[in-house]
């Protein structure tokens, strides 16, 4: 391990996700284990600009592994997008003797870290934290597994109502640019149809599928819609279209919204956060920078930060096939 890093700063940025606190805990304790200092930076890059720092020791992260959200808070910072803002942030890091950064967040957070590194040659390592699972270089982002479990639990409850009333429910889940939550939760909850941005199903095929379901004896149906799906302008437009063309259905819409981002992280997310947090610190201590730590084939691997930002996470085509077969 290289010895030129004496203090590491850790921040959470962008949208919160379950598992972020477990990752903060792992970073802080990995620093303590390797006898270096750790500083928590509150409110992401905005807190870096304002000098909102707090020293963190091994005991300062007691009892946070089970908590959703982030104790370091999160904020989007327009000021950090300007050279003046980044200059202020750099001055604060230098005056607080912080030698390197661990950034827990998504694409926007990593882009900020990359630009900051280019301008100041400041060591940065990223940990992917977003429920959407839309980051290249990891099979799972922090919070994704927890969000899936939350969504499946909610859909199970909606199904009880759908089957009691012979209703068709459109359930909208998060996933502006990626259909990972919709596809996996849809299979896990036994949805009849899953609409995701990666596969433009088209309105006619949706109607065709619903008619087949009805003809095969299904009295109620659940359609899971990723918020980024391109079929209709929004889920309410889909509802209107189906009601006009299939008046036999009583159609309802349920938007799960921000409940998907909250809650106590699953065991999987806690273990993943712990692995990624330790790896982030050890990567910096090895003198490496500009990498994201991620999970690839169940091993913790490094992906260059610019590749993580530019690359696209791909939907599993086999899962689409599985979904078509099991929803027959």
Image (tube, rainbow, N blue to C red):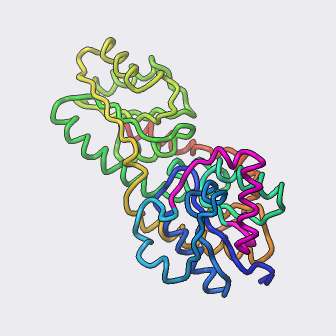
Which residue is drawn at the image coordinates 48% and 76% (left, top)? 61
> What quarter of the picture does the N terminus occupy?
bottom right
In the rendered image, residue 173, in percent from the top left (x then y), is placed at 42, 40
Residue 149, placed above or below residue 239: below
Which residue is drawn at the image coordinates 76% and 63% (left, top)? 91
Which residue is drawn at the image coordinates 45% and 59% (left, top)? 69
Q: Quadrant of residue 267?
A: bottom left
Residue 35, placed above or below residue 274: below
In the rendered image, residue 135, in percent from the top left (x then y), is placed at 63, 50
Residue 159 visible, this angle: yes
Q: Quadrant of residue 264?
A: bottom left
In the rendered image, residue 9, in percent from the top left (x then y), is placed at 65, 69
The question of residue 193 being in magenta is answered with no
Q: Which residues are magenta?
A: 73-101
Q: Quadrant of residue 105?
A: bottom right
Which residue is drawn at the image coordinates 68% and 83% (left, top)? 36
Q: In this image, 77 relative to 189: left or right?
A: right
């Amino acid at each position: 391990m290289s010895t030129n890093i004496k203090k590491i700063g850790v921040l959470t940025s962008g949208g919160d996700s379950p598992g972020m606190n477990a990752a903060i805990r792992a970073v802080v304790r990995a620093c303590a284990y390797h006898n270096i200092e750790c500083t928590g930076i509150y409110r992401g890059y905005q807190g870096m600009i304002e000098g909102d720092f707090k020293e963190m020791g091994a005991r300062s992260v007691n009892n946070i592994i089970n908590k959703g959200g982030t104790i370091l808070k999160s904020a989007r910072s327009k000021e950090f997008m300007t050279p003046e803002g980044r200059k202020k942030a750099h001055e604060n890091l230098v005056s607080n003797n912080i030698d390197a950064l661990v950034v827990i967040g998504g694409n926007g957070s990593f882009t900020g870290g990359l630009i900051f590194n280019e301008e100041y040659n400041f060591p940065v390592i990223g940990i992917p934290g977003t429920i959407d699972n839309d980051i290249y270089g990891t099979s799972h982002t922090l919070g994704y597994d927890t969000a899936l479990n939350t969504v499946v639990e909610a859909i199970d409850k909606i199904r009880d109502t759908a089957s009691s009333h012979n209703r068709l429910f459109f359930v909208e889940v998060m996933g502006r640019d990626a259909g990972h939550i919709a596809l996996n939760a849809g299979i896990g909850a036994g949805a009849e149809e899953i609409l995701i941005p990666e596969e433009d199903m088209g309105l006619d095929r949706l109607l065709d599928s619903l008619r087949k379901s009805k003809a095969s004896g299904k009295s109620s149906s659940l359609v899971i819609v990723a918020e980024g799906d391109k079929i209709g302008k929004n889920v309410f437009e889909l509802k209107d279209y189906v009601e006009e063309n299939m008046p036999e259905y009583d159609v309802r819409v349920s938007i799960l919204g921000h409940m998907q981002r909250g809650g106590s992280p699953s065991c999987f997310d806690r273990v993943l956060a712990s692995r990624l947090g330790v790896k982030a610190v050890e990567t910096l201590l090895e003198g490496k920078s500009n990498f994201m730590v991620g999970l690839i084939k169940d091993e913790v691997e490094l992906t260059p930060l610019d590749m993580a930002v530019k690359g696209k996470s791909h939907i599993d085509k086999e899962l689409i096939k599985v979904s078509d077969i099991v929803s027959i």
